[in-house]
Image (cartoon, helix red, strand yellow):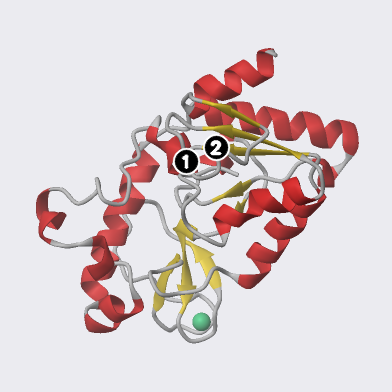
Amino acid sequence: MTGAGISAESGIPTFRDAQTGHWARFRPEDLASPDAYQRDPELVWEWYADRYRDVMRAQPNRGHTLLAELEAEKQAAFGPDAFTLVTQNVDGLHQRAGSAGPLELHGTLLSARCETCGHVQPLPDAVTFAPPPVCEVCGHRMRPHIVWFGEFLPEDVLEAADHAFAAADVALIIGTSSLVYPAAGLADRTLARGGLVFEINPDETPLTRRASFSLRATASEGLTHLREA
Ligand SMILES: [Zn+2]
């Protein structure tokens, strides 16, 4: 499972660090919530269009590439269930590095979801994108396909992640503060079955003491170490 730390090395600003320039006078909570969207959908879309352009300008880094390699190796050797990538990130960098289908716990900046029929479709090219997108199925307005403050994680995605952690011999927890539940509790599913939990994070987190091993390193440094070990 990966969090913001792995994308920091690609220059993706964290949620709060993205509040610069025009956006400095807004708090993320005032843009990334159902209330904010109800109040001013154009403003919220403008902000997400900016975030979308940010991530499409960024490139995946060595951490993303190493995880994509690990996925390909494990799945080639042991089948599709041998490796599951779960991410809290919404930037699509794992897919661009070659990971096939990460479970995106918080949705994605690269797609929109129809407010009327629930259809999900990719956003047009970041350079020409002018929000709001219109549903190709029913023609109604779409919202960002993102989990907002006050919303639940998508149940099917969380369930698939929970299943993978509960079946895992080894769980890698990379670049996440392990503060926010339910994602923070997934590692405990692996520990409960007697599996190993490796944490890679520059800072100590609430998981550090429970983890089987904990590396004080960035995502790319830590993964490089593990691959060479
Ligand atoms: Zn629709």
One can see residue 104 in this view: no
Instruction: Identify which amino acid the numbered label 2 is placed on.
Output: Thr
143 or 141, which lies in front? 143
Residue at the spot of label 1: 205
- For the point 45% across and 67% down, the residue is 147
- For the point 70% across and 14% down, the residue is 229
Q: Does the beta carbon of the residue at mark 2 sit less than 8 Å from ligand 1?
A: no
Image spot of residue 126 (x, y percent)? 35, 51
Q: Is residue 195 left or right of residue 92?
A: right
Number of marks present in the image shown: 2
Q: Give the label on residue 90, or none.
A: none
Distance CA(mark 2)–CA(mark 1)? 5 Å
Image spot of residue 167 (x, y percent)? 82, 50
- For the point 88% across and 31% down, the residue is 77
Q: Is residue 53 left or right of residue 173?
A: left
Residue at the spot of label 2: 208
Q: Are marks 2 and 1 in contact (CB under 8 Å)?
A: yes
Residue at the front extreme?
Answer: 209
Q: Is residue 68 above or below residue 23?
A: above
Give the quadrant of the N terminus: top right
130 or 74, which lies in front? 74
Q: Secondary structure at mark 2?
A: loop
